Image (tube, grey):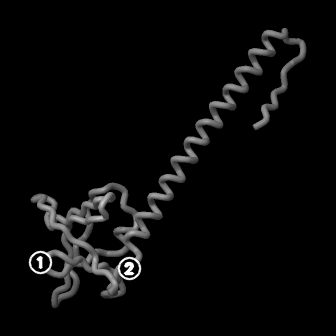
Amino acid sequence: MVAAININPSFQYGARKNIYKSALTSLYNKKKIWNQLTVERHLRQKNKSLEKNRFRFYKKIYTIDNVKYYKVVGLESDYYIEVDSLSYTSSPQFVVQLCYYTVNGMKCKRALLRINHLKDEMFISESTLNIAFNSCKFESIS
């Protein structure tokens, strides 16, 4: 990075030296901040892509009424979660719509989904009031 500063040559040597010094330190600080922001942005983008890929590959997708769902395996009945609701997971625990198919069509209820990033596990609490998590996973392609 090149510092280009127009300084009046009539300034004394000490004043010019201080101006150059302050300009260079401010440029250095700006560059340091920009580098830090770039690194943080790259980490966020990498985490988002990993989240998307973890749910997307090798999972069976059902299409019901022109909406795409993942089937949840491991609970007492068949539940479905919309594919679009898991595209951006902002925190390890969040509220999702847990859908189930009845004779009258798809019914939905709110559920709490918790993801363990270290072991790649999912836990679902069928009620947001009574938090009792059950271990489950999405149906995979076999």
Q: Identify the residue at the far bottom of this view.
A: 103
Quadrant the C terminus occupies = bottom left
Mark 2 is on which residue type?
A: Tyr
Residue 127 position within the rendered picture, expressed as x and y whole percent measured from the top left: 14, 64
Does dot 1 land on a helix, a strand or a loop?
Answer: loop
Instruction: Say which of marks 2 and 1 sits in front.
Output: 2
Residues at marks 2 and 1 touching, judged by CB atoms closer than 8 Å: no
Q: Position of residue 2 (x, y in %)?
A: 79, 35
Rendered image quadrant of residue 99: bottom left
Question: How far apart, in angstroms, are the residues tagged by discs 2 and 1?
Answer: 23 Å
Position of residue 23 measured from the top left corner of the image (x, y, whole percent): 72, 25
Q: Residues within 10 Å of mark 2 (few under 14, many from 20)?
A: few
Relative vertical location of residue 53 with respect to residue 14 in this rendering, above or below? below
Q: Viewer-proximal residue, 129 or 117?
A: 117
Q: Is residue 127 above or below residue 79?
A: above
Earlier residue among tags 2 and 1: 2
Q: Position of residue 98 (x, y in %)?
A: 22, 72
Residue 103, quarter of the rendered image: bottom left
Q: Which residue is labeled 1 in the image?
A: 76
Residue under the point 40% across and 68% down: 87
Q: Residue at x 85, y 12 (%)?
A: 11
Q: Which mark is residue 52?
A: none
Identified by mark 1, the residue type is: Glu
Query: Does 2 sit left or right of 119 as displayed?
Result: right
Q: Which mark is residue 58?
A: 2
